[in-house]
Amino acid sequence: MDGRKIRWGILSTANIGLMKVIPGIQRSPHSEVVAIASRSLAAAQAAAERLAIPKAYGSYEDLLADPDVDAIYNPLPNDLHVPWTLQAVAAGKHVLCEKPIALDRQDAERLRSAAPGPLIMEAFMVRFHPQWLRARDIVRSGRLGEAKIITSFFSYHNVDPANIRNDPKKGGGGTWDIGCYPIVAARFLFEAEPIRLVSLMDRDPAFRTDRIASALVDFGSGRCLTFTVSTQAVPHQSVQIFGTKARLEIIIPFNAPQGKATTILVDDGSALDASSATRETMAPSDQYAEQAEAMATAILSGHPPPYGVEDAITNMGILDAMMRSERSGAWERI
C-alpha cells in the first residue's frame, strides 16, 4: 500500500472512544481521526480540542454528510449500534462498531441489508493483540496437546443506576457487555463454533440486568468453554486453555494495558503451584491501534475485513442462546 490513510469520524464522545479507541486509531499508520460528533456541539468541541481532532459536529447526521470522512467508529449505546451503522453505510462510510453489535441475532441480521460496498466490522479489539495471536499459534502448534477446555472470568463493579450498562432497554447487563468476550475467546482459540450451551444467571432486583452470568458451552469433540462474568464483583479477568499436555494462561486477556508489554504462561503441570510455568512476554502493543490498522488495511486493499457481519451475527446467536437457557433452565442449541 502507498501512504494513503483512512479518515475516521467518531460517533459520540463515549468514554471508551475518548480514553482508548481514538488514541489507538491515531496510532494506526494508515489512519487519521478527522471528525467527532456529539448531540452536544460543546461536548464534541471539547473532545476535539482534547484529542487534536480537526472537526467537531453537533449532530451525527452532519458528520455522516462530511465527504472527507471515509470510516466511522460507532461506540453508541448497544440499542443504537445497528440503526446508526446502517445510516453510516447508507452514507457510504465504512463502520467499526462497538460490541455487542446488536441487541440480539435478529437485530444483527438487519445488517445484511446494508448497502454493498462499505465494510462493517465488530470491534473486538482483543483478536488483534499479539498475545492472543501468539496464544492461538501455541494452540495450533500442539504444544498444549489437544486443547480441550477453556475457562474464563471477567468482572467489574458498577452499581450506578444512571450507567447504561445497568439499563436493560439499552442492552445492559453482564452477558451483553462482557459475556461476549469469553465466547469470542473460545471461538478464536478453538477455531470452531459451539453447538449448544446451558447458562445460569442472577439478576439485579432493581435494574433487572444480569449481574452474574455463567455458561457451559459445548464445542463438540470433547471441547468446552466454561465462564462467568459479573457487573457487581471485584474486578478480575482471566483466560486459560487446558490441553492434554499443558495449559496456557493469558494474564490480562481483555483490558491489556495500552502500549505496554503483556505476558502469557505455558505450564506443563509438573508443579501444582505453577512454578513449572514458563513466561513469554509480548512487546508493548496497542490492541486498539492494531484493530484500526486491520480495518484500514482492509478498506485500502479492497479486501473483506478479517471479521465481518456474519461473524457478528454468529456471536449474537450464541448470546441469544444464553438468554433462552436462562428462561428454560436447559441446554439450548445454537
Image (tube, rainbow, N blue to C red):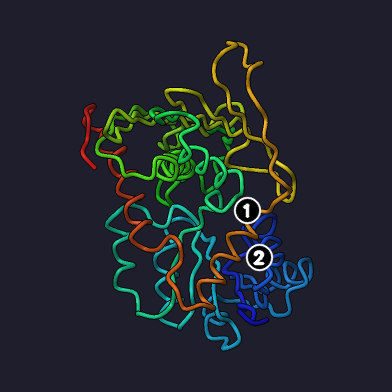
Report the residue at 49% width, 70% height from top. 95
SS at circle 1: helix
- Height in image: 187 above or below 49? above
Q: Name the kind of residue labelled 2 in the image.
A: Ile
On the picture, is 71 further left or further right than 288? left
> Crowding near pointer 2: few (<14 within 10 Å), some, many (20+)?
many
Relative depth, front residue between 258 and 154:
258
Percent coordinates x, y for residue 179 in the rendering: 44, 39
Quarter location, residue 209: top left
Percent coordinates x, y for residue 140 in the rendering: 45, 41
Q: Are marks 2 and 1 in contact (CB under 8 Å)?
A: no
**Marks 2/1: CA–CA distance:** 10 Å
Report the residue at 51% width, 57% height from top. 123
Q: How many marks?
A: 2
The residue where tag 1 is placed is 287
Report the residue at 63% width, 17% height from top. 276
On the picture, is 302 further left or further right than 219? right
The residue where tag 2 is placed is 25
Q: Name the kind of residue labelled 1 in the image.
A: Gln
SS at circle 2: helix
- Height in image: 295 above or below 139? below
Percent coordinates x, y for residue 250 in the rendering: 58, 34
Looking at the image, the residue that sits furthest to the bottom is 67
